[in-house]
Image (spheres, grey):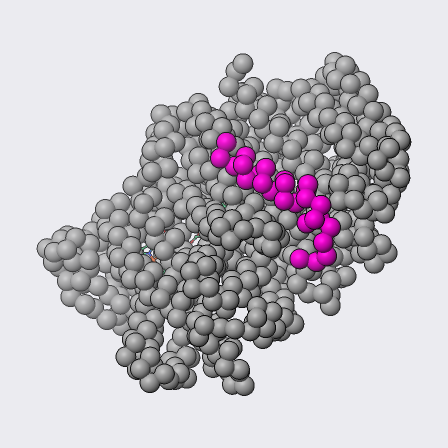
């Protein structure tokens, strides 16, 4: 592989690893905040136990989120020096604010984790709130930089590549900033809910549990399902908003996502299938007539641009269609599972005081993997769908990439590092929770429950 | 003052803050490893400092990188190209170190091994980080085919690079020992204080010696003459710096009525930090206007003016908002005896 391809794979791998922990950092901090609020509100110690145990998991995950974040932050400069040269002049503002968001999160995370017993209930809530705020803000800010790459604004470029006429705030609030960052935040919340629901569902599938343990997991499950459902609904709307944004600002990305080659009105939405750029068609896909035109602008006569309008060498890779489909599919499935589970509870389980059946619990367990399929494929879609541009219509990926030697061997080292850290994280989490069984924590809080 | 000068001053301040915080952080990780079995109170003190603070210290590192990119993007371009391999290795070390440190809290059965690896990898970081200095001095970078290339052979066979590394290491150990001595006393643990005081007493002269060795080896090797002659002009600052070291070192022996043990660690820490501040300022001044000798200066690599002023405003606002949080943090973790005194969290 040449250095540019290696750099792309290297950076994509680092981000794909970081985003797992970063997303959990955002999603879990929201869930922990909700648990603390429920504890103060209902005075049910189960919620305090839940918050405490999830905080422990959160702290362990942060031990990977932060160094991997440091890796991607510095690698941005190492692998894309050409890009960073422009970033520094135009869009360094969100990166700078992000540092303050990191400080906010790190400060209050330490306060919450290491000094919890010294804080009044109000200060505890405030600390978790700031942790959540810091994590959410860091997502919004990094997405500001990413959306600016997709829809650059706030500067002009001369023929020779020099920059002038810079307005950092216009760059920050670029045309896809609001839709993009909102989508990222809401899908992170969705993932937090989905992961906690999956774990609670997994625990409920196990036998040999005390009544108190079952009650505890059910409370966690209900809270998580409600969060999944609400954020899932908002996610759908915000995903739609993002698609409209593509229609307006990145037409070739939309065309590639949907496998549209010819410009047409009454454009169909194609689900699944394989895009073949040579024959210019999508094979084996399921076509829903008119749907794409309606999605883009609410009427079937909306004209959607096809790839034929753009020079072939700037077409995004054909596989973006697959990643886009996977993302939407993962999102819809999560929404459906949460909705069915809650409907089942409302209509059946609640009245007969019954448990969830195991088929439903198994589906709930699938929420966890689905969340990450959505996040990963969504990002790969967004970043690969921008190709061949790093900064859309201003800088090509080849111009951004490093020319340094030894990219390949170091990439290999980092793959090993990520595999190793990933495996170790799972082992540490499992060992920790096996050594500190739930029952002991429940007893430590008086053993009562308002189930 | 020119915008460029303000920017470089802010950048220096950040680099300086990180080099102190990072030295204490990485050094403390080392002490935590050393004293884990041999002397549990000294090990405990080290951990008690490390647990809540490493995240903040790490954020400072990212702060330095982001400020560098924001203020001097062209210099970031050149340095990123030249330093690709060493910095990538530093990142891997940091990842192993931070995660192992966190894991060791939750994994008591393997705590020893985990902390051992965290301690060792942590110590390699300052040694590698300081190689940025010889590289920016221009000795080991050449333009080959239009790109900055690091001359690995020269770098790895150069005694001055190793003497820089030695200086980075001894500084990390000295600063952290000194800081932990003060922290032990603050917590009321005279036993740990005694240990860290002795370590500081041994390491103080060692840092001074390694600084001299570094200077001598640079002048013998003679590949950064421009810097040496500039450094000579700043002799006054270095003299003040040396004076502060003497005060700080002596403070470890002043008798202190409130305690059984000798020494005023707080005075020692503050004057040694001031010592490093003066020396860093003098070094930085001698380095100007070059960021990377001889092609990249602070003038040729400066960012856009509008971006610069936006960043400046952000610094003011950000610090104003975060300051109360830092004060709360300081009171909870570094001042409070009850917290520092109690057993595991
Ligand atoms: C759990 C995760 C998840 C789920 C279920 C969805 N998305 Fe998404 N989507 C993301 C996670 C994500 C993301 C990872 O957050 C992305 C990648 C880059 C970005 O800005 O957000 C993204 C990007 C993204 C983009 C591209 C934005 C751009 O590149 O400028 C569009 C058009 C959509 N999404 C649309 C949708 C639709 C219509 C969905 C289904 C209803 C959907 N997303 C579900
Ligand atoms: C949308 C994708 C991303 C999200 C949602 C995200 C979010 C987060 C979160 C929540 C953390 C933990 C912060 C803390 O606890 O201090 C984190 C760490 C970090 N992230 Fe990401 N991140 C993303 C992508 C990136 C990218 C692309 C970069 C760099 C260009 C980056 C740079 C960092 C850095 C430097 C840290 C470490 C901060 C520290 O040292 O405290 N992140 N990120
Ligand atoms: C965190 C989730 C993310 C993932 C999984 C991800 C994934 C990827 C992948 C796979 C590539 C290679 C694209 C290709 O060559 O086909 C890439 C490139 C890139 N991404 Fe992302 N990305 C993420 C977030 C971000 C963010 C938030 C930023 C903005 C700061 C960003 C900036 C870049 C840059 C600069 C490149 C290289 C240049 C380019 O290929 O355009 N990425 N990313």
Q: Is residue A444 above or below residue A104?
A: below
Magenta region includes residue B331 = yes
Residue B287 shown left or right of residue A400 in the figure: right
Q: Is residue A442 above or below residue B59?
A: below
Residue displayed at 76% across by 57% down? B116
Q: Is residue A106 above or below residue A232?
A: above
Residue A173 shown left or right of residue B291 in the figure: left
- Res. B27 image quadrant: top right
Q: Position of residue A225 (x, y in %)?
A: 37, 69
Residue displayed at 54% across by 24% down? B7
Camera-side residue of A47 and A298: A47
Camera-side residue of B52 and A151: B52
- Main SS of the magenta segment? helix
Q: Position of residue A389 (x, y in %)?
A: 38, 45
Residue displayed at 12% across by 56% down? A299
Q: Position of residue A328 (x, y in %)?
A: 32, 64
Give the magenta part as a residue range.
B320-345
Report if residue A183 is visible in the image: yes
Magenta region includes residue B86 = no
Q: Position of residue A192 (x, y in %)?
A: 44, 62
Report if residue B122 is visible in the image: no
């Amino acid at each position: 592989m040449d250095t540019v391809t290696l750099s792309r794979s290297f950076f994509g791998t680092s981000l794909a690893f970081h985003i797992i922990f970063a997303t959990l950092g955002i999603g879990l901090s929201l869930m922990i905040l909700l648990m603390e609020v429920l504890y103060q509100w209902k005075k049910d110690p189960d919620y305090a136990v839940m918050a405490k145990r999830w905080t422990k998991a959160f702290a362990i995950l942060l031990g990977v989120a932060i160094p991997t974040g440091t890796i991607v932050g510095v690698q941005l400069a190492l692998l894309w020096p050409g890009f960073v040269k422009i970033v520094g002049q135009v869009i360094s503002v969100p990166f700078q604010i992000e540092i303050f968001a990191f400080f906010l999160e790190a400060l209050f995370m330490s306060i919450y984790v290491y000094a919890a017993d010294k804080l009044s209930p109000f200060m505890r809530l405030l600390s978790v709130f700031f942790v959540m705020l810091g994590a959410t803000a860091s997502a919004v800010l990094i997405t500001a930089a990413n959306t600016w790459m997709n829809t650059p604004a706030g500067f002009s470029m001369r023929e020779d590549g020099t920059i002038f006429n810079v307005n950092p705030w216009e760059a920050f609030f670029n045309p896809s900033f609001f839709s993009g960052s909102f989508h990222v935040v809401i899908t992170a919340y969705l993932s937090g809910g989905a992961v906690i629901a999956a774990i609670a569902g997994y625990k409920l599938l196990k036998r040999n549990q005390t009544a108190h343990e079952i009650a505890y997991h059910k409370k966690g499950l209900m809270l998580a399902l409600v969060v999944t459902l609400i954020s899932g609904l908002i996610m759908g709307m915000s995903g739609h908003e993002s698609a409209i944004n593509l229609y307006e600002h990145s037409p070739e990305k939309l065309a590639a996502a949907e496998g549209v080659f010819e410009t047409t009105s009454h454009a169909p939405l194609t689900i699944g299938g394989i895009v073949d750029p040579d024959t210019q068609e999508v094979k084996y896909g399921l076509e829903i007539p008119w749907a794409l035109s309606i999605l883009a602008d609410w009427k079937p006569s909306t004209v959607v641009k096809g790839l034929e309008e753009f020079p072939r060498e700037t077409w995004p890779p054909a596989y973006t269609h697959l990643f886009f489909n996977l993302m939407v599919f993962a999102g819809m499935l999560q929404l459906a599972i949460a909705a069915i589970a809650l409907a089942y509870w409302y209509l059946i389980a609640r009245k007969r005081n019954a448990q969830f059946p195991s088929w439903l619990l198994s589906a709930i367990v699938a929420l966890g993997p689905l969340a990450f399929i959505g996040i990963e494929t969504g990002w790969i879609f967004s970043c690969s769908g921008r190709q061949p541009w790093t900064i859309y219509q201003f800088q090509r990926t080849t111009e951004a990439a490093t020319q340094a030697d030894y990219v390949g061997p170091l990439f290999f080292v980092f793959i090993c590092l990520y595999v190793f850290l990933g495996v170790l994280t799972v082992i540490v989490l499992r060992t920790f929770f096996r050594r500190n069984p739930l029952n002991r924590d429940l007893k430590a809080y008086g053993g009562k429950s308002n189930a | 003052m020119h915008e460029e000068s303000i920017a470089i001053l802010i950048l220096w301040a950040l680099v300086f803050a990180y080099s102190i915080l990072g030295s204490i952080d990485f050094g403390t990780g080392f002490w935590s490893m050393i004293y884990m079995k041999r002397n549990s109170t000294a090990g405990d003190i080290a951990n008690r400092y490390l647990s809540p603070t490493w995240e903040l210290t790490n954020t400072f590192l990212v702060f330095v990188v982001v400020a560098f990119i924001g203020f001097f993007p062209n210099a970031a371009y050149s340095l990123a190209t030249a330093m690709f391999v060493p910095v990538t290795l530093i990142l891997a070390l940091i990842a192993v170190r931070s995660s192992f440190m966190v894991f060791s809290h939750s994994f008591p059965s393997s705590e020893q091994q985990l902390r051992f690896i965290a301690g060792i990898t942590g110590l390699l970081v300052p040694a590698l980080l300081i190689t940025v200095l010889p590289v920016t001095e221009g000795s080991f970078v050449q333009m080959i085919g239009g790109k900055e290339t690091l001359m690995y052979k020269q770098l790895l066979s150069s005694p001055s690079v190793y003497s820089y590394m030695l200086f980075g290491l001894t500084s990390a150990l000295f600063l952290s020992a000194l800081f932990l001595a003060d922290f032990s006393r603050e917590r009321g643990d005279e036993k740990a204080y005694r240990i860290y005081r002795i370590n500081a007493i041994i390491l103080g002269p060692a840092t001074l010696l390694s600084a001299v060795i570094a200077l001598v080896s640079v002048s013998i090797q003679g590949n950064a003459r421009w810097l040496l002659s500039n450094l000579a002009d700043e002799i006054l600052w270095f003299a003040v710096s040396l004076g502060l070291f003497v005060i700080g070192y002596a403070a470890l022996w002043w008798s202190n009525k409130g305690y059984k043990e000798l020494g005023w660690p707080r005075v020692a820490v503050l004057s040694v930090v001031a010592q490093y501040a003066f020396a860093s300022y003098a070094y930085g001044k001698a380095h100007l206007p070059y960021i990377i000798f001889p092609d990249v200066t602070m003038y040729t690599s400066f960012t856009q003016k509008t971006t610069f002023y936006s960043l400046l405003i952000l610094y003011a606002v950000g610090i104003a908002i975060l300051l109360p949080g830092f004060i709360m943090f300081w009171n909870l973790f570094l001042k409070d005896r009850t917290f520092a005194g109690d057993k595991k969290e």
